[in-house]
Amino acid sequence: MPGKRQKRRPKKPEPEYYQIEVDNWDASYTFGANRSGKRFSEDYFESSYIFLNGKIVSPSLKKTDQARIMISSDHKLKDCWEQPSMEKPAELVGWITLLTDDSLLEFMVWLPPQSHQYVSSIAASGKIKYAWVYGTKLKYRQGQVYNLRISSYLEEDD
């Protein structure tokens, strides 16, 4: 009698630190009435983004050396400091995508509203020069973001 086939466990995603030298930033904001009622459960909708654009310092990627970090406010995270989740703990704060034309590595990161306001003010001052994203290595052009750190100076490795 042949042996049972063992189930293959999915590999855990490999961690990766991405270091980006930020050379410019931009922002976008939208607010409106939720007339359709389909997209949002509230009467109004709002979205705001900070875009940090720059060059990937490390790791060296074959496809591109350009990056964009899109930072958005998530109102569901408003009370994340006061009320611990009764469900499972948070696993990620965003996603990584290599665009299909290989021109750009894009990071999408969600912050609590109060943190987003702080990051907006330091972006407007022009002081953000470096960003580090701790996440996973790309697999099928996708990855996860666990942590974002921004600074006005190049920090030594931790």
Image (tube, rainbow, N blue to C red):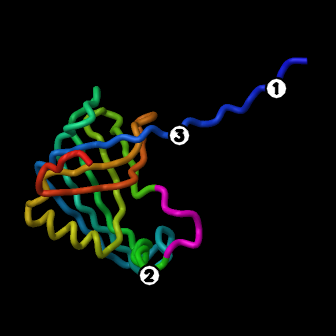
Q: Amino acid at mark 2?
A: Asp
Quarter of the N terminus within the rendering:
top right
Q: Amino acid at mark 3?
A: Lys
- The front one of 121 and 7 is 7
Give the image location of residue 21, x and y in percent: 15, 45
Tell me: residue 128, above or below residue 144: below
Residue 89 horizontal side relative to residue 97, left or right: right
Tell me: residue 98, above or below residue 125: above
Residue placed farthest to the top in the image?
1
Q: Which label's residue is closer to the chain start, 2 or 1?
A: 1
Report the magenta residues as a range.
84-91
Residue placed farthest to the right in the image?
1
Discs 1, 3 touching: Cβ within 8 Å = no
Query: What secondary structure is the stretch in magenta mostly built from?
Result: loop
Q: Amino acid at mark 1?
A: Lys
Q: Please name the residue that numbered disc 3 is placed on.
A: 12
Discs 2, 3 touching: Cβ within 8 Å = no
Give the image location of residue 113, x and y in percent: 32, 74
Circle 1 SS class? loop
Residue 43, disc: 2
Q: Residue at x 42, y 47 (%)?
A: 144
Give the image location of residue 116, x and y in percent: 27, 69
Tell me: residue 72, above or below residue 24: below
Residue placed farthest to the left in the image?
126
Quarter assignment of residue 118? bottom left
Q: Residue at x 14, y 49 (%)?
A: 154
Q: Residue at x 28, y 30 (%)?
A: 61
Tag 3: Cα neighbours inside 10 Å, few (<14), some, or many (≥20)? Answer: few
Q: Please name the residue that numbered disc 1 is placed on.
A: 4
